Amino acid sequence: MLDKTDIHTRLEAPVLKDYGVYLAVDRLLACQKPLATLVTPDELQFQIVHQVEELWMKLAAFTLAEIDQHLRDGQFMRAITLFGRVHMLLRMMTDQLALIETMSPYDYQAIRLQLGNGSGQESPGFQMLLTLPAGLWDTYRTLYLDPQKRTLTDIYDTGYAHDEAYMVAEALIEFDELFQKFRAHHIYLVHRSIGMGSKAISGRAVDLLDAGARHRFFPELWAIRAQMTDRWGAAYGVKRDSIRHGDAGHGSGV
Ligand code: HEM
């Protein structure tokens, strides 16, 4: 049988060797409520998941600043590698939301009363990430569009060469997509734990979260696809010829 009291005591007073000192494990493990004061055992998970997500957002924001610098320094390969890191962080952030779905709605109600007026909307990491894409787009325009007088139509379509300008644009849209996927998964988490019809702390959660999930950081990068589809589609009209054999009257007849 496990001695729960002893486990709690040891968790709260870790023995630090060099590893623990370097990683400040004592301070890290003191960032959660004292175990004796948890309103329900699930509160520890609730705090840790949010804290871990905050750390991933810190790393993502830090890395985006590095990427911007590398792009401006002409270090394209480094930027692409680091974009991969940021994308992975966003995927992990999204996956890790599922941990919270192992908590019952009942247990969450008790935790919710502990939050004061707080909600994830106030997350410093999330608020920081929201502010960065505008600057990255500015860098993109300054490096890849303005000086060569290129347009996205050129990069994606009429002058398509799968070049650096294309690769960076794709890394940006990937960030946009993954960020919105995080938001979409979070909406399911909210549905699952408190429901979307309930009153939220800062107005109607459903409106706020839905508006956020519709947002796009790089609307031009989304628009270029639609423009291409319309342009290429114009060659054969809106309704396409069938490609079925012998589809009389619709005439491909391949
Ligand atoms: C039981 C679990 C959760 C519930 C019930 C919940 C609920 C909510 C609600 C109702 C909002 C809308 C803002 C408001 O009403 O003030 C919100 C926003 C937000 N939450 Fe959560 N949340 C949960 C877990 C998480 C987790 C684990 C994260 C991880 C970072 C998170 C991050 C966010 C963020 C970033 C926003 C702002 C979203 C946006 O503006 O699009 N939430 N949350």
Image (spheres, rainbow, N blue to C red):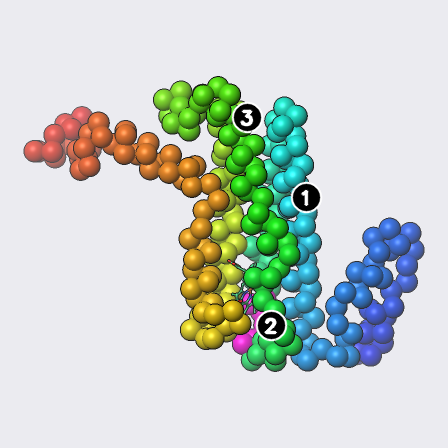
Which label lies toward us, 2 or 1? 2
In what quadrant of the picture does the N terminus appear?
A: bottom right
Chain-order first, disc 2 or disc 1? 1
Q: Which residue is rendered at x = 58% and y = 67% of the image? A: 119
In what quadrant of the picture does the C terminus appear?
A: top left
- Where disc 2 sits, the SS reads loop
Q: Amino acid at mark 1?
A: Phe
- Residue 167 visible in this rendered orientation of the protein: no
Q: Which residue is rendered at x = 45% and y = 21% of the image? A: 149
Instruction: Measure how far apart labels 3 and 1 are at the Cα level.
Output: 21 Å
Residue 244 lies within the magenta run: no
Q: Amino acid at mark 3?
A: Leu
Residue that badge 2 annotates? 117
Specify whether 68 is left or right of 224.
right
- Where disc 1 sits, the SS reads helix
Sort mark 2 into few (<14), some (14-19) or many (20+) by Cα contacts within 10 Å.
few
- Residue 143, disc: 3
Which label lies toward us, 3 or 1? 3
Q: Which residue is rendered at x = 47% and y = 70% of the image? A: 203
Which picture quadrant has residue 125? bottom right
For the record, the magenta segment spans 100-105
Q: Amino acid at mark 2?
A: Asn
Sort mark 1 into few (<14), some (14-19) or many (20+) by Cα contacts within 10 Å.
some
Chain-order first, disc 3 or disc 1? 1
Residue that badge 1 annotates? 62
Predominant secondary structure, magenta span: loop
Q: From what the image shows, is residue 67 above or below residue 31? A: above
- Residue 231 visible in this rendered orientation of the protein: yes
Sort mark 3 into few (<14), some (14-19) or many (20+) by Cα contacts within 10 Å.
some
Instruction: Measure how far apart labels 2 and 1 are at the Cα level.
Output: 28 Å
Q: Is mark 3 within 8 Å of ligand 1?
A: no
| Callouts 2 and 1 close, C-beta under 8 Å | no
